[in-house]
Image: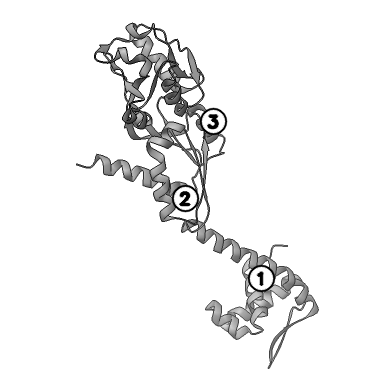
Amino acid sequence: MNVNYEYYRLFYYVCKYHSITRAANVLRMSQPNVTRALNRLEEQLGCKLLVRSTRGVTMTPEGEVLFAHVEIAQEQLQAGESELAGITALESGALTISASETALNVFLLDKLREFHRRYPGVRLRIANHSTPQAIRALGRGLVDLCVITTPARLESTMRRTLLMPFQEILIAGRNFEFLQGRRWALKELQQYPLICLGSETMTYAFYNQFYLSNNLVLQPDTEAATTDQVVPLVKSGLGLGYVPQNFAKDALAAGDVFTIQLKEEIPTRHVVLVQDGGRVPNAAAREFARMLNSSVTQQNAP
């Protein structure tokens, strides 16, 4: 049966207030229009729903049966509208981000802190993924957006925004102090053990390309699972290691490690925001992306 939803809505308010006049006032409608709609509803359903008297409006047994269902539907719709209003106003909802470890530590933490300060009602879910894992999660719709580091191989529907450049350095521990005081060519350092992330990571791909561009082969002696493992491994004397500069700042300040000066320049890497253009982001994801883009605009302002 194809009954106009508006008839049910008017029926709900008339029953709620037991008055056509009051319902019309609440809905800002004329009383005759409300009456006509109720008459039409009764015609379409083929039964009497309401009894009008000088004391107001009462429901017939059939009206009570219908109202029991209409009340649930109307209150659920109102609850949905209220919840949706909270989500669009960023008073509630959730934001799921896939972040690589480096992106999280060199850039994202401060932005998450600021977003949470502005919108404390939005739940944050942070997945710590490698760059390839983050891109797969975004492509499958498991996360709203991802913040990763270059290099990155994106799917055709995805678009990226460069957020921040960062520089990596080569560090060594105290047992390699004899390497201080001069600039070294990569080829000269190949005799020393090297610590690197695993071959499935984009960091490995980055340094593999860096070595190939200098006619060398990347041959790490120790593979670390995460970037934050590299500094402790270097401190322990297991070898030399490449890390983002800020990952090593405490160890550098304490004198536990030092920077090896290279003749070759390590290419600059970037933290990037990746979004899937094939999906419509929710309100929280749109606002967080806007905040990230705004911070880039402010950094680039003259």
Q: Residue at x 68, y 74 (%)?
A: 40
- Dot 1 falls on a residue whose secondary structure is helix
> Which amino acid type is marked by label 2?
Ala
Find disc 3 in the rendering and name its residue: 136
Q: Nearer the viewer, mark 2 or mark 1?
A: 2
> Which amino acid type is marked by label 1?
Tyr
Could you tell which of marks 2 and 3 lies nearer the N-terminus? 3
Q: CA distance from mark 2 to mark 1?
A: 34 Å
Q: Is residue 75 above or below residue 17?
A: above
2 and 1 marks in contact (CB < 8 Å): no
Quick one: quadrant of the N terminus?
A: bottom right
Residue lying farthest to the bottom in this orientation: 54
- Dot 2 falls on a residue whose secondary structure is helix
Q: Nearer the viewer, residue 296 or 263?
A: 263
Q: Residue at x 57, y 81 (%)?
A: 24
Find disc 1 in the rendering and name its residue: 8
- Dot 3 falls on a residue whose secondary structure is helix
On residue 284, which mark appears? 2
| Residue 207 percent across, percent down from the top left | 40, 17
| Residue 291 percent across, percent down from the top left | 37, 47
Q: Is residue 273 visible?
A: no
1 and 3 marks in contact (CB < 8 Å): no
2 and 3 marks in contact (CB < 8 Å): no
